[in-house]
Amino acid sequence: MIAIDSPPWCYFVGVTLPDEKQGFSRRLRDSLRRTAVDPRNATGLAREFNLRYQGAPVTVQAARKWLEGKSLPSQDKIRALAMWLDVSPHWLRFGDPESRSARAQTSFRQDAPSYRLDPGWLERKVGLLDESHQRMIVEMVIALLRLEGKP
């Protein structure tokens, strides 16, 4: 039902934008319950999402707003969430019943995070660390190379 005092920009097919945000939040939390991520834990959601998303990382505050129904992620983030949570992007965003073809398209659940293996990304991220943490990374790489029998 549309609230009489809602501004015109928030109408969308008879549903107000706050209703859409709450619906998205409810579907997101329900989907998270099937994973190892606590649906009340914005930090865990942000961490797990960022491991799977190739764009700019989301903040804990953004993830909290998704969980509380205060904001909606962009469409590319909804697609990444849907792939991870094994639901259709359309259902996650709008809650409409999924068609058989929509379910078939999302049957490739992403259980393990797809870490960024781009050497440039790794170099930039390591460069952001302080010197002691950079040394730890180097020592870890040397240990892994020894473990694999590589020089």
Image (cartoon, rainbow, N blue to C red):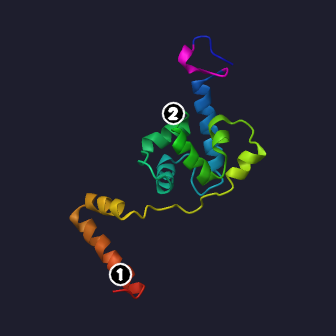
Q: Residue at x 51, y 38 (%)?
A: 74
Magenta stretch, residue numbers: 6-14
Provide residue 108's location: percent of width, then percent of height: 65, 58
Q: Mark 1 or mark 2, which is nearer the start of the sequence?
A: 2
Q: Which residue is mark 1?
A: 143
Asked if the magenta segment contains residue 77, the reply would be no
- How far apart marks 2 and 1 lie (CA) works out to 44 Å
Provide residue 136's location: percent of width, then percent of height: 29, 71
Q: Amino acid at mark 1?
A: Ala
Task: State yes or no: discs 2 and 1 in contact (Cβ < 8 Å).
Answer: no
Asked if the magenta segment contains residue 12, the reply would be yes
Provide residue 79's location: percent of width, then percent of height: 57, 46
Q: Amino acid at mark 2?
A: Ser
Which type of secondary structure does the marked residue at label 1 adopt?
helix
- Say above or below: 142 vs 29: below
What is the residue that sits farthest to the right in this orientation? Answer: 100
Q: Which residue is mark 2?
A: 71
87, 39: nearer the viewer: 87
| Disc 2 packing (10 Å; few <14; some 14–19; many ≥20) | some
Q: Residue at x 49, y 43 (%)?
A: 63
| Disc 1 packing (10 Å; few <14; some 14–19; many ≥20) | few
Q: Residue at x 65, y 17 (%)?
A: 2
